[in-house]
Image (cartoon, helix red, strand yellow):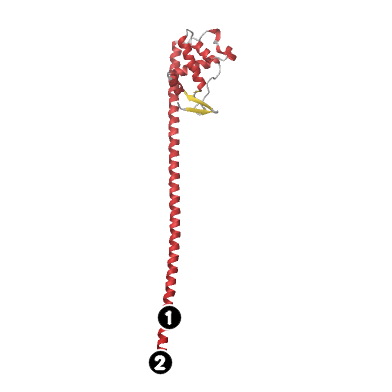
Amino acid sequence: MKTIMQDATEYYSAADTAKTLGVTYQTLYNWSKAIEELNGYQVFDRDDNTHSKMYSAEDIEKFQNFQHINKNTNITRNQALQQAFGDPDKKGDLEPSGGTSKIISEEAQLLMDGILKEFQKSNERAEHKDALIEQSQQKALELSTDYEAIKKERDELLEQNKQLIESTKEVTAASKEAIETNKQLLEEINKSKAEGKKGFWSKLFG
């Protein structure tokens, strides 16, 4: 399951939690809503970005305990929820008014089901949007990495070109020096030849 880190605590999305418990998203939503109504306060933390419910490992363990109680006893669903999630310090908040469960008419239940379906669709769209954002961020990271690699390669090529230019300058300077040296040697040779000829004729007619 994909974890959500918030306030140094690991949480799981409603979809992942429902999958772990082996129930549908709507069933988990109904249980969560019933728990918070019975307790009279917000039991489950919300995601700072999507404001959707998040569930900790402890919450999942309590739900599994509730499933065991609900399956193996004859008490009502709400009573099983109270046993699994009940806070001894808030017993007054746990019991519904009059000590009896609220009776919801068929018409109200249908209306609630419709609202829950719309909420589920909205949540799925939000999760899809988050997935698209995550994909975009990953693509941006890949492009950034590619850019850094290209920039590094370009810098290396520029450095090699710079070294090649410097090497070419050194070779050119050495060539000029060699040419100048050869020119001086040639002048010395010509001068020596000229002086040699002059000495020969001087000796002949002197």
Residue, disc 2: 205
Which residue appears at 50% of the width and 17% of the height?
Answer: 62
Can you identify the residue that label 1 sits on? 192
Residue 138: image location, x then y, percent: 44, 36
Establish if 44 lies above or below 95: below
Neighbours of disc 1 within 10 Å: few (<14), some (14-19), many (20+): few
For mark 2, give the secondary structure: helix
User: Quadrant of the rendered structure where residue 201 is?
Assistant: bottom left
Where is residue 72 drawn, in percent x and y?
Answer: 46, 10
Label 1 to label 2: alpha-carbon separation: 21 Å
Local secondary structure at mark 1: helix
The three-letter amino acid code for the residue at tag 1 is Ser
- Determine the residue positioned at 43% across, 32% down: 132
Question: Which residue is nearer to you in this view: 155 or 36?
Answer: 155
Q: Quadrant of the C terminus?
A: bottom left
Among the 4 quarters of the image, the one containing residue 143: top left
Asked if labels 2 and 1 touch by Cβ distance under 8 angstroms, the answer is no
- Give residue 66's position: percent from left, percent from top: 49, 14
* Foreground of the two, 131 or 65: 65
Identify the mark nearer the N-term, 1 or 2: 1
Identify the image quadrant of the N terminus.
top left
Tell which of 144 and 186 is nearer to you. 186
Q: Is residue 2 above or below residue 114?
A: below
Residue 70 image position (x, y, % from top left): 47, 11
